[in-house]
Image: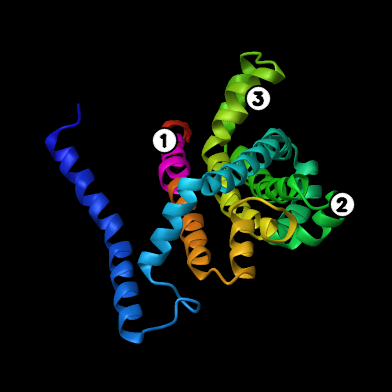
Amino acid sequence: MPSLMALRRRAVNLLWFIAPFAALALVWVVAVELTDVPSRVFPALAEVWSAGVGMVADGSLWQHVGVSLQRTVTGAALAAVISIPFGILMGISRPVAAYFSPILRFSVALAGIAWIPLATLWFGFGNRAVIFIIFNAVFFSLTYNTMLGVSRIAPDMHRAARSLGAPRYRMFTEVYLPGSLPSVVTGLRIGMGYAWRGLIAAEIIATSAGLGYMLFLARRFYHTDIIVLSMIIIGLIWLAMDRFLLAPLERRTVERWGMVAGATR
């Protein structure tokens, strides 16, 4: 059971987290009231709330959110399966790293949105194009960070494992992968940020479902309440993913494996 002090600290942290959003909502309400701006230009908070309630009731919001999350998980999982072993290979082989590092650095700058035109030409309009964009956004960041993580493993760990006769698969599972995990998770967090932005952009262009498409469709019919609602949901989902999934995973990984790596130096 958490102590009273821990509960109080969590409550204070939650209030500090909510405070800027509450202030922004207050400014929104006051600004709309004072300026009397037409709802077609910028909707009132109550109108956005009403649009959200309606989309929850008819199930369309859950459909768009579910499709976007499914694409994100699929693309990121495919990228992780390929990029982590490839990054480890680059980390343990200087010739491979020297050959591919310039390409990785170049591609990180282009990952995600820049590939949308080619993705639609190669895969057409639909899930495959969007999943490719997510894969692309995660792959290069995760590969590069995995390579950096392996290269930072203390040499003593390599020598100790080899002196004990560890076969290659055990070097992978007990030295390279655990030793690189802090960098792997950091790369995943960065890549997912690129992927989420790429997902929304790709869904605006290449699909007929998802949060990006919901945003595009609302703009097409001048439903500014749904446009703003879409923006809020996109931001809140990423905020929840980063704060409650990726950031804790990164912190716990660094606490578990980072300290172990630090103790060997």
Name the residue rendered at 64%, 18% in the picture.
170
Whole-angstrom CA distance, mark 2 to mark 1, is: 39 Å
Q: Could you say which disc has been placed on residue 122 in the image? A: 2
Identify the secondary structure beneath mark 2.
helix
Residue 116: say if magenta. no
User: Residue 72 at x, y = what percent?
Assistant: 62, 44
User: Residue 119 at x, y = what percent?
Assistant: 80, 54
Q: Could you say which disc has been placed on residue 93 in the image? A: none
- The disc, 2 or 1, on the residue closer to the chain's N-terminal end is 2
Residue positioned most to the bottom? 35
Q: Could you say which disc has been placed on residue 252 in the image? A: 1
Whole-angstrom CA distance, mark 3 to mark 1, is: 21 Å
Residue type beneath disc 1: Arg
User: Residue 112 at x, y = what percent?
Assistant: 69, 56
Q: Are marks 2 and 1 in contact (CB under 8 Å)?
A: no
Counting labels gives 3
Q: Nearer the viewer, residue 258 or 218?
A: 218
Q: Nearer the viewer, residue 182 or 16?
A: 16
| Range drawn in magenta | 241-253
- The disc, 3 or 1, on the residue closer to the chain's N-terminal end is 3
Q: Judge from the rendering whether residue 44 lies leftward or rightward of residue 41; answer left or right.
A: left
The residue mark sitting in front, 2 or 3, is 2
Q: Nearer the viewer, residue 182 or 207?
A: 207
User: Residue 238 at x, y = what percent?
Assistant: 49, 51
**Quadrant in the picture for the N terminus:** top left
Identify the secondary structure beneath mark 3.
helix
